[in-house]
Amino acid sequence: MFPNAITSRLPTLLLALLLVLLPLAIFAKTAQEVWSEGGFSFDVPTLLFIHRFATPALDRVMVFITTVAGLSSLPFITLAVCTLFWFRRHHRWAVFILLAVAGSGALMLTIKVLFRRVRPHLWISPAPETDYGFPSGHSITTISFFLALVLLAWPTRYR
């Protein structure tokens, strides 16, 4: 029924499909909970638990990590990596990284507008955010960047 080339790769193709569908299913379940219930039952208790350890010094460290070393610097890091790949004649790699990060950013912004989940405000934040709280832009873009790098570094002919 299937050509031999497909049947010999079937386990690899099924694994790849699973690795795509599993995170998608987890995100879909999470999104469904945010959509129908407005959030998670563990949001407030988790935030209150974390806030117990807050100090002005730790606040400054976290603000630095999430702003300067986080989302605001990721476009520059992405462009630097793309430039490095481009000048080393890995044009496809450069385009892949750029599309992965830019595409995930565009997808994240679209989902934020669709869900319009307001961030929980339990105290005055040392780094106030003005956009919506779901999905996490820090998480999506950082994971997309590093996952793209892992996929490019993976020594396989299917890359």
Image: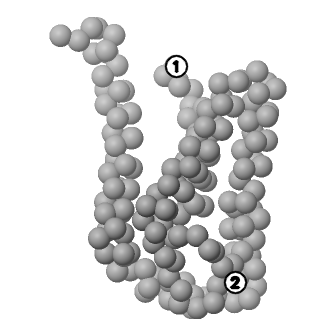
Three-letter amino acid code at the position of disc 1: Arg
Q: Upstream in the sequence, badge 1 or badge 2?
A: 2
Neighbour class for label 2 at 10 Å: few (<14), some, many (≥20)?
A: few
From the top left corner, tell me how far across and down residue 93 is, in percent. 66, 29
Residue sitting at x 57%, y 88%: 51
* Residue found at the very far front of the displayed protein: 113
Residue 62 visible to an observer of this rendering: yes
The residue wearing badge 1 is: 157
Q: Is residue 83 left or right of residue 1?
A: right
Q: Residue at x 34, y 19 (%)?
A: 9
At a point 54% along the width and 57% down the height, the residue shown is 109
Q: Position of residue 126 (x, y in %)?
A: 69, 83
Q: Are marks 1 and 2 in contact (CB under 8 Å)?
A: no
Q: Quadrant of residue 63?
A: bottom right
Reading the image, the residue beneath label 2 is 126
Q: Position of residue 62 (x, y in %)?
A: 69, 75
- Element assignment for label 1: loop
Q: Tag 1: Cα neighbours inside 10 Å, few (<14), some, or many (≥20)? A: few
> What amino acid type should be assigned to the residue bearing mark 2?
Pro
Work out whether 20 lies above or below 110.
above
Q: Quadrant of the N terminus?
A: top left
| Residue at the right extreme of this rendering | 87
Along the line of sight, the residue nearer the viewer: 68 or 156: 68
Cα distance in 3D space between marks 1 and 2: 47 Å
Q: The residue tagged with tag 2: helix, strand or loop? A: loop
